[in-house]
Image (cartoon, rainbow, N blue to C red):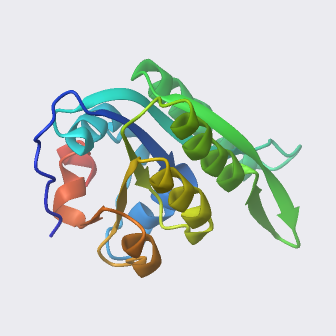
Amino acid sequence: MATRPENKNTEERVIIFLDGSNFYHRLKDSEFRFKQLLDFDYKRFAEWLAHGRIIIDCIYYVGLVRKEVGNAKSEELVRSQQKLFANLQKLSWTVKIGYMMKHDKDYKEKGVDVKLAVDILDMAYQDRYDTAIIVSSDTDLIPAIMRAKELGKIIEHIGFSHRPSFAMQRYSKLSRLLGKVELEQFLPKNFL
């Protein structure tokens, strides 16, 4: 069960950095099996993560799905992603996109981790936040995290109880592993 940070400083500025693909796939894992993720309440989730602190920005990073001519599945994925982007923007989230590259029959996300890492560093150098809340289990972010910490920034890692990232935990001041109970509160009851 995840524990909440003590809220000693309500003036503390936080930015939430969310790895969209990582988040989506963890919620679809067999341990959760959440459906209708387009209805996930990202605004309430951000407020819950911030726990009374000042939210400077919430940023959702993801690879852009491209429509393939004659591929009904790709057309549905594009429509769903556009709906997600509209919903996030309506909830005041910033969406930053990379791209999807076809490799054999699968697609691989490219450029997303680099954007996320650069933003963690760039915003640390600009002193835009006191605490970075990083919702990702991608260990490629560790060099950026280490440098942000050297600049005096606090790093909070948000992961998943069924797939913990021990490396991300080690480099964060606080690590919270979310389980099904914590995440269910952000989905409409009739979609669980």
Q: Is residue 7 visible?
A: yes
Which of 155/37 is in front?
A: 155
Residue 119 left/right relative to 30: right
Q: Residue at x 21, y 46 (%)?
A: 190
Expressed as whole percent of the image width and height from the top left, the position of residue 118 reads 66, 45
Expressed as whole percent of the image width and height from the top left, the position of residue 95 reads 58, 32
Q: Residue at x 62, y 38 (%)?
A: 122
Query: Which quadrant of the view contains residue 2?
Result: bottom left
Q: Is residue 110 above or below residue 103?
A: above
Which of 8/80 is in front?
A: 8
Quadrant (top left/top right/bottom left/bottom right) for the C terminus: bottom left
Expressed as whole percent of the image width and height from the top left, the position of residue 188 reads 23, 42
Q: Is residue 169 above or below residue 61?
A: below
Residue 26 left/right relative to 78: left
Which of 12/165 is in front?
A: 12
Q: Residue at x 14, y 55 (%)?
A: 4
Q: Is residue 38 above or below residue 137?
A: above
Residue 78 left/right relative to 43: right
Q: Is residue 79 visible?
A: no
Q: How many marks?
A: 0
Query: Which quadrant of the view contains residue 21?
Result: bottom right
